[in-house]
Image (cartoon, grey):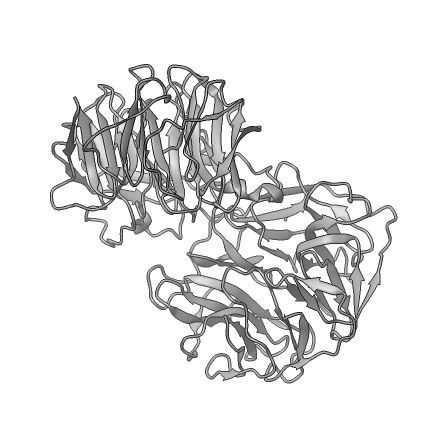
Amino acid sequence: MICVVLAITAYSLSAAEPVKDSAYRWQSVSIGGGGYVTGLVIHPKVADLVYIRTDVGGFYRWNPHDGSCMPLIDHFRTEQSSYFGGESLAIDPGNPDILYIAAGMYLNSKGAIFKSDDRGQTWNKLTLETPMNGNGPLRSGGERLVVSPHDSNILLFGSRNEGLFRSQDAGTTWSKIDAFPGNLTVKEGIECISFDTRTAGLVYACAFRDAVYRSADAGLTWTKLEGSPAQVLRMDIAGDGTLFTVGSTGVFRFREGVWKDLTPTGEHRSYGSITVDPKDPKHVAICYAGFNKNPNLDQPRGLYESKDGGDTWTSKICSPESTVPWHSPRNMAMSASSLTFDPHHPGRAWLTDFFSVWKTDGFTQERPVWKNYSKNHEEVVPFSLTSPPAGAPLLSAVADVGGFRHDSLDEFPSEMLGKWGSANWDQYTYQIAYCETKPLELARAGGNHWNGVWGGSISHDGGKTWQRYKSFPKNVVPLRIAMSATDPNKIVMAIQNGQAIRTKDGGTTWEQVTGLPKGPSDQWKWCLPLAADNVDGDVFYYVADGKLYRSNDGGASFTLVSGKSPTFYTDPNWTQLRTVPGKKGEIWVSGLNGGLARSTDGGETFSRLTQFKQVRLFAFGAPAAAGEPAALYVYGAFFHGKFADKPGIGIYRSLDLGKTWQDIQDPKVAVGDSPCCMEASRQTFGLVFIGTNGRGIFYGAQAGSSK
């Protein structure tokens, strides 16, 4: 924590009965995929019962009626955000209503296994907790969590750090199988497990850096299969008992005690997915792992089919038909993870990759047509959100895919803010700023993260078209941006680990700003330390190192605003600085556990709102009526008052600058996947946006409103 040296007067706003709560509805802003779908499982006895897992966006069930993906853990709260990392999922072959998930984002916290008795509508947390890494290396591998097809009480889970676990009472209790002899490396462990559907008790497990192991007693004892490949990512068992594996060393078959290398001739590389036709043990398909960068759709995309058990292969050329306008057709099979023949529909196959879920009903055709299903699968990670007082209702600054102008919140955007694959495209957009008096004038900060080309662009039409800055300093990473309230040519940027810069001619020339410390340490900080005064076009504000700075000369120089009392605390990763629409010199600052503070004199003095013990995010939006205060929205936790007994973090709205509050969170859609940015509409009262670290962007609106 850093102590902010600001002159703050602590005051407790009225704890009287708050304004009557208004029912709010929350739903996803439609973008269309944009995140890694790491696995797909189909129930063997119920048609169209399909589940997917993602690396940072949780778990979904496919809706065959409209082709959408139904999120299954959206009611998980922020305190459960790590569970949006999809380590594994398992169906119960004997009971289609039962579903298990292994959920955990990173190894620095305990993951957990959950069980559902109603196909994912509700969940019970089981007793096994162990570090998981749904967003880590090898996340695209096979399932670590499996249920025996012969006995629904038996479950196995291969962990990354703590070995093999077994349950014989449907997950109620677990025991560690110390007899597993595999050489298990830290962070990788057991990559995948698969039961043989023909022979009771027969099961295989892959110790990633070691070998494939076999058990004949449902996982109690194990034997190494000599000669087996290492670094196996996935495996599948044919109806005749033949075992197939794919991984970093190629494609292999194990039959009658003998291993055989089946890797396609001349294509010895890493393969990430394999499937065997449930109706034909000789019908096998495989796909490359990693990124497929072939831009020519008339060329193979790393997908192969065999009709003789893998002895020979035919390269498949695909015809992708994307339902998402901004998706490039060549995105298909980019870092493909799972490839699965559907046991209920002959000719149907599913493929998951870095962006989407794909399905074809004509896999055996010479050139199958694939269609992606991204409705409700929202997985982009926004760095920040912008809602100008005119133009599109929302602009998003996004990792990996640049960002979007959202003319509609319920329809996929027609294009990204840049062109896919171009070295000049801002693949990472960190923030978009607008001019208060000319809100169609925009500027963005970002760059091509993978190629190390940084800069940004400007727009004169509200983000419909963009032009690169005419020049930009080399070797600087622009993380935050602010534009003068009256002059769109005046722009200030905060630089990663460097001195802030500014332009006074719309990006033609740049100069260093004086008086400020170095900018944020890296891109994965959710702070908003920089803002322009909402009225005075020459005034900018900056919070850093526990101090408030102000510029009165268009951002050319900043000076430390005098402060007296070190009573306001901020977290440098979460500090938020915002100015209030139509109010000169009014700024608000939040600091996570430091609460929320307000200044009406340009930062000379502050008053603190004492109800909150934590303010993670906040934003100002359109007032309830002309002449009334801007609506204030907070994602945080109360210290005292009406909502002090509410567990964890909630979403609140105040129409009187913090005197009274409304709870606008929907327990069914808690927006709990590590919320990282917030914005409120300047055009529509009651409309508010929250970006998450893996479940895309949500918008909330009063029930019955037209948004």
Q: Quadrant of residue 164?
A: top left
In front here: 214 or 234? 214
507 displayed left or right of 323: right
The answer to whether residue 452 is visible is yes
Residue 523 is situated, as x and y percent measured from the top left of the image, at 49, 63
Residue 439 is situated, as x and y percent measured from the top left of the image, at 59, 69
Check the image and report above or below for 304 versus 96: below
Check the image and report above or below for 17 versus 146: below
User: For the N terminus, which image quadrant?
Assistant: bottom right
In front here: 495 or 19? 495
Residue 605 is situated, as x and y percent measured from the top left of the image, at 79, 72
The answer to whether residue 706 is visible is no
Q: Residue at x 43, y 47 (%)?
A: 35
Check the image and report above or below for 535 versus 223: below
Residue 154 is situated, as x and y percent measured from the top left of the image, at 43, 19
181 displayed left or right of 174: left
Q: Quadrant of residue 65?
A: top left
Q: Quadrant of residue 3?
A: bottom right
Number of marks drawn = 0
